[in-house]
Amino acid sequence: MNLAFDWLAAEPAEVRKRIADALNDAERAEFEYHWGLSARAAQLAPDGDWRVWLIMAGRGFGKTRAGAEWVRSIAERDCTARIALVSSSLAEARAVMVEGESGIIASSPPDRAPIFEASLRRLRWPNGAQAQLFSAAEPESLRGPQHSHAWCDEIGKWPLGADRATRCWDNLLMGLRLGNDLKIAVTTTPRAVPLVQRLIKTEGSGGAHVTRGSTYDNADNLPARFLDAIESEYAGSQLARQEIGGELVTDIEGALWNRSLIEQCRETASPCEHRRVVIAVDPPVSASGDECGIIAAALGLDGKARVLADCSVAKAQPDQWAKAVATAAREWNADRVIAEANQGGAMVESVLRAAETNLPVKLVHASRGKVARAEPVAALYAAGRAAHCGQFGKLEDQMCGFMLGGDYAGPGRSPDRADALVWAMSELMLTPTISPRVQTL
């Protein structure tokens, strides 16, 4: 990186353009790859005494580019640098950190770009600096290797089972002992998992320097349709505060579910085969107030129950939410539709059958309060017998609002989605099944 261009970063855009037009080809190429001219201040490594630079920001903030440019700056100025690149898997490390659109190779000038040696999981710069790829799913792979620097991406989604995320971090720290400028850059969307919370506690006093930011901080470089879509889909939810606003959403003390538990129970994909699939419905009392909770869930061949989809609808007339239920049942080839009948009784079944005559409806009646019904379902999650195939922000917000003792802390006045989830899980995991017995005459 040519530091002679640094002063231009503070100049107005029209001044920079005039100067750029006057450059020769070699100078213009250098100008194009000068990160300080295009980066926002929050994307540049902070001054001062710090060991960990934690960029905790919303989706699309530019975290990956900031991490890649930081690694490039180290490699180009220090030919002895040995940098660890750690992601949740080797595939993600390669696809995002190395070869991604904002990754290290794309961010590097062609004449100084590193060579990626896939078989060795290594990046090698022309001056001799090197970076090695590691997976957080294999903490022991970081036991032994020594490094001068490290870039850790999306630590909020590192594997949590058997404390792999914290073991990976600890092994990385113990191997960070080459040179005199030992530093780690961490780029992540905020999630209230133990490792993220641990780093937050070290903020300041030579520990972690935390950079916080929102998706909208990078609005000039993001498609307007993307911004409109996330606003319409997630506005007002706690998921929006986390994934867009970059806020670390903490748990409510005394809640049946917490976000760390839900993260541990999250899966990227559902098994292809299921023993049973159900659609659970929590019908609204009126069309102008509560939502109609509609949850698709399945019992896998491994005995684990999984949430497949949240098909809930808001402010829907009876025929509208009934059609949404029928659509979900067809889409997921449901064996049963479980509908709470406390509000409306037989009317609920007739509305559903009006939407589709052959809908396999089973009415259930609540003899206990919502939270009392939810407690054994929360125990399924704690035991690792329930999972979410994907992210369901509004549903998970409601789950984290169920309180021990019988209260609901929000969001909203009623946990319609979470109540439908409880009915689905109860049907799949907590309802006794009677096997037919054949008597020989």
Image (tube, helix red, strand yellow):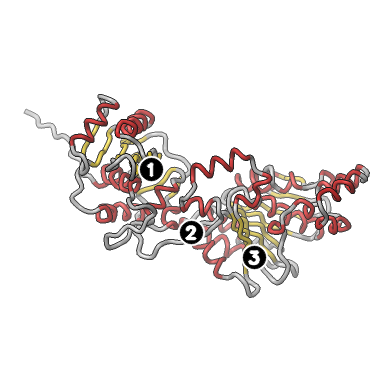
Left or right of residue 139, residue 12 in this image: right
- Give me the residue at 48% from left, 51% from top: 239
Residue 302 found in image quarter: top left
In the rendered structure, which amino acid carries the disc numbered 1? Val
Q: Secondary structure at mark 1?
A: strand
Mark 3 lies on residue? 52
Q: Earlier in the sequence, mark 2 or mark 3?
A: 3
- Give me the residue at 46% from left, 56% from top: 161
**Alpha carbon distance from label 2 to label 3:** 21 Å
Give residue 2's position: percent from left, percent from top.
Answer: 86, 55
Mark 2 lies on residue? 249
Quadrant of the drawing holding the C terminus: top left
Mark 1 touches mark 2? (CB < 8 Å) = no
Q: Earlier in the sequence, mark 3 or mark 1?
A: 3
Which label is found at residue 307? Answer: 1
The residue most toward the front is: 288
Q: Secondary structure at mark 3?
A: strand
